[in-house]
Amino acid sequence: MEIFDILVTVSFWVAALRIATPLIFGVTGALLCERAGVLNLGIEGIMTVGAMTGWITVHLGGSLWGGVVAAMAMGALCGLVLAVLTVKLGLSQHVSGLGVTMLATSASYFTYRVVLPNANTPPRIQPFEPLNIPGLSDLPVIGPILFQQTALTLLAIALVALTAWFLNRTPLGLALRAVGENPAAVEAQGLDVHRLRMGAVVAGSAVMALGGAFLTMSAFNAFFFEMVAGRGWICIALTVFASWRPGKALIGAILFGAFDAFQVRLQQVVGGAVPGQVFLMIPYLLSIVALVVWSRKASYPKALMVPYIKGQR
Amino acid sequence: MIRLEPRGETPRLLALTAPVVAALVALALAAIPIMAAGAPLLKAYQVMFEGALGSRFALTEVVSRATPLILTGLAAAIAFRARLYNIGAEGQLYLGAVAAVAVGSGRFDGPPALMIAAVLIAGAIAGALLMLGPTLMKVKLGADEVVTTLLLNFIVILFVQIMIEGPMKDPMSLGWPQSEPIIDSAALPKLIEKTRVHAGLIVALVAALGVHVFLAHTVPGFRIRAVGANPAAARFAGMSVTGTMLLVGALSGALAGLAGVGEVAGLKGYLTNNLSPGYGYAGIVVAMLAGLSPLGVVLAAFFVAAVFVGADSMSRGINVSSYIANLIVALALISVLVSGVVTRWRIRFGRPGG
Amino acid sequence: MTETRPIVLELRTITKRFGPLVANDAVDLVMRKGEILALLGENGAGKTTLMNILFGHYLADAGEVLVADAHGGLQPLPPGSPHAALAAGIGMVHQHFTLAENLTVLDNITLGTEPLFALHRSTRAARAKLEDLMARSGLTVDLDATVARLAVGERQRIEILKALYRDARILVLDEPTAVLTPQESDGLFATLRALAAQGLSVVFISHKLNEVVSASDRVAVLRGGRKVAERETAGADRATLAELMVGRPIAASRREPREPGRTVLKLDAVSVAGHDVRTRLASVSLDLREGEVVGVAGVSGNGQTALASLVCGLVAPSAGTMTLLDQALTEFDPGAFVAAGIGRIPEDRHSEGVVGSMSIAENVALETIGTERFQTGGFLKFGAMRQAAEEAIRGYEIKCPGPDAPIRLLSGGNMQKAILARALDGAPKLIIANQPTRGLDVGAVAEVHRRLLAARMRGAAVLLISEDLDELFELSDRIAVMFRSRLTAALPSAGLDLKTLGLMMAGHDPAEVAA
């Protein structure tokens, strides 16, 4: 039973929250898009762009926060491409999303090669440091778990709260929810369906890109090919698990991080008895399970994946 | 302000030229990254075209690359026709390759005709089984198949690693993670000596013709088209949506599995975890460029293969990263999507504010 | 008296084309403060298009809209902008309600009324204003309810409140009575009358002469996209209006007397499990005999969908038995129902009736593609399919480019004829017709009615589910009413009147109604 003792150690939960951070960004961004009725399958590519942009900005002499802003801007740009395809032109959200993922991913890899034509080991950058806020970080249990993280992790949690407040308490949030439920209702109330949806996709994509930026600027300190490794797709599964609620999405992402952290420790305990890849499969399998279990029960935004073309009979 | 107005029928000429224009637009847009990489633009295009089409060797390379792309393109085309978004061709390709190694690496032997049939069937079955899971999850549980098939790709790659580092590991490989080789009797023969063109091409071409006839001329093909275009009407008319979807899933997975068999039993001879440079994903682009037409897939596969081969030569010749190929392919996908808007709708640039 | 009331709205030479179709042809219209104007016309006359242009959903190809500002001066309304229309005091209640079902009533009403980038929503003020509005107009509804749980009548009230909440001075209603019982319709018009007395100008779209004559001050008649007449309602007579609306004599189908034969379809205490009242059936019993039409009336959403799904083979019963010609039905599958000789006309042609991108020939063969007629050894017989389609095109006078044209290019009436050709092929013993004439023009309606009555004369049993009460009275030998997933006994239509049927649709017992 000793492996379960892991669950009560503080260091385990510190790791869980750290692993969860890119997922928190990703699922929050995905949720913003989907609540407005657009499935953003560009997420995997957008996270890759965020990772590359954040890293390259710092590598070329920019500041860390400069990298964060640059990553968001590039994510927003990818979101704009997707929004034009899916909202303005009403194209298949599935295929357009994959197109954006392919474009964003290959553009990131190509850019990396332009900047570093021949590097075999990717150069490291000086990453975000754990905050260590005097007072807060010394609190028992909560102190280390929350405040020995980097600023990006706290930003992720703050963003979830902000998103929940925005969706439920502001007029724009109401309009965004409504456009994901019934665009005709939104137009009949004099609002612009396309602008709302495009805005949501652009903003959501910027948030997704932060998830990628966390990977290079706070976790691995360098850019690797295929480093996003399906985290984007996992986030899409998490939105279903969370029934499109920000709070549940946060819990889902942290649970996921906990499973992943647990898996790493379990691997150390079990050792070579089982191939390491079996453990690496766990997050993907869990995502599929989440989809299978919750897809039927989830209360989908009613107009998710339904394009809206004005003046159509 | 852009407005869309529906066309009645799409003019045939427009429908046929749209993908060609999309491909050209993608090639033209590639100028931006090429210039960003600091390469001389005209030289780059010249190297790319000569590398893809300028020699007998180049052409055979294009043919050998097109072989798996035809099969993954067909896998996507037939599935997308039924609005089953199988994005898992990459995983199905790898699992097909694993099955080919399991059957064709000497555990048993027989005459070549039998052994070749055995590896092909094993690969097709493996791919089909892998796609049945997401299809069932979609029709029975409503789980989005795009996400499940994408996630399965990661799982299959990890599974391949387990196999080539464990049960299928080649003891003679000096520690490199690769499988035991395919034995001679199970290998797909070369079609042209001293090139990489192998009998998998025939499999691919026959499959393209077969899928065309199946979709256009048979009752199950009719059902697939109906279910894909309007599942509610198909069901109301008495068709089994679940059954049709499962058939499509199995066929799609089988086609992608065959692509894996060709790569391992026709080209490489053994399985590694970099067997495919993304043929599964590129197959989606092939299918979209082909307008989901099985015969069009053959042409589109040759185009995408030429892009890959040309980009390789650009990377060797003038040091532009070969990721330019993935970029061009992605641009082609987006261009062809947009061209679809042009063929189905008239785009009007209307009065501002109204 | 009327002339002294100020003009609040003027449409000038509005023209709108959809491809080759001219939906509105230089239409002029004037509205005065506090009057109720009826826009009369058959389906496809261009009424809804005209109002959608007024509200900015569509852009007119020519013409302009002028609205009175606060000082009474007429100002041009920016085209193509619902936002501008709302700001100018125009409110619109669409025939298909524009409500977000998963949101609350309050959310739906306040949506878009506050500055979008405000940091909080002033729900308290909104609530106060709405309480006041509800008290004054009599349109009450629970502000905190989720729309999905509300009945159609309540949803219509929300739509009207949405307009009033924005201080609309002109209210447009598109076919407002289509989904109401006759009594609810009376209530609605009383409310509109009261609102008009307070200064609201009301336009309502209708193709029903009765309500136009009884509820409007003035009537404008549209036909084929043109305004063909405009009258004070007081002086207009119904026969003239009917002639103006249709423009050509239509031979009305007459139901000839006929003795019903043996029972074709028998439902014995059949229930269907469902998650709400729409999709549930509670112990429904029905006898349907050869050579009779049984109509099913009811306010939309009371289980008609479940009944139609059941008899079309789409859902299996959870209890009870279903018998077709003395044979208990056991296999609940649309294919089996087709094979058993049941002709089915679905509620929604576009979503369930046809595969739009496939050809007319393929759609005509859709249900029987697996039979020897259209295939040998799994291979399609294109010749046979085309021949069947050509026969359908000739026999039903389907206007189309040819059997190979995609069926989505057909007009609603022609598409419905193709579905009719498919459903009635092979002289089925039982015909299920679910809203068979919805959205069709008068000519197509007459054709559908003629075909159904002809099938009845040759001995078919017809189950007609419809929201059009005139249609039900015209075609049905007996009428039953669905209310909250239950079906009343089918009563002879000759002994029923509109008022009784309306009360039954509101859930009153027929015996109690008669008393």
Image (cartoon, coloured by chain):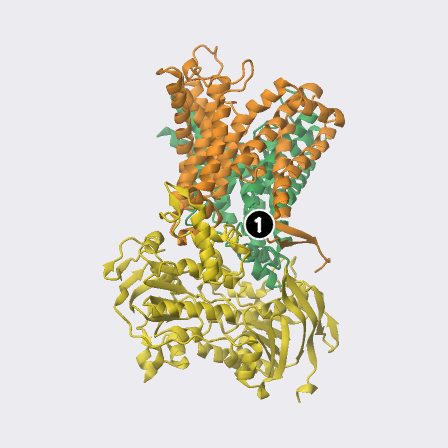
Q: Name the image quarter holding the C terminus of chain C.
A: bottom left
Name the spot of residue C195 as percent of width and height, x first.
58, 80
Q: Name the image quarter holding the N terminus of chain C.
A: bottom right
Q: Which chain is green?
A: A
Residue found at x 49% / y 42% = B81
Of residue C39 and residue A38, the one placed in the foreground of this image is C39
Q: Is residue B226 above or below residue C348?
A: above
The kind of secondary structure element at disc 1 is: helix
Q: Is residue B28 above or below residue C364?
A: above
Left or right of C78, for residue C43: left
Q: Colour of chain B?
A: orange
Q: Is residue C80 above or below residue B24?
A: below
Amino acid type assigned to the residue bearing label 1 in the image: Thr
Name the spot of residue A27 as percent of width and height, x first.
53, 43
Of residue A156 and residue C498, the one placed in the foreground of this image is C498
Q: From where the camera sits, is residue A261 visible?
A: no
Q: Colour of chain C?
A: yellow
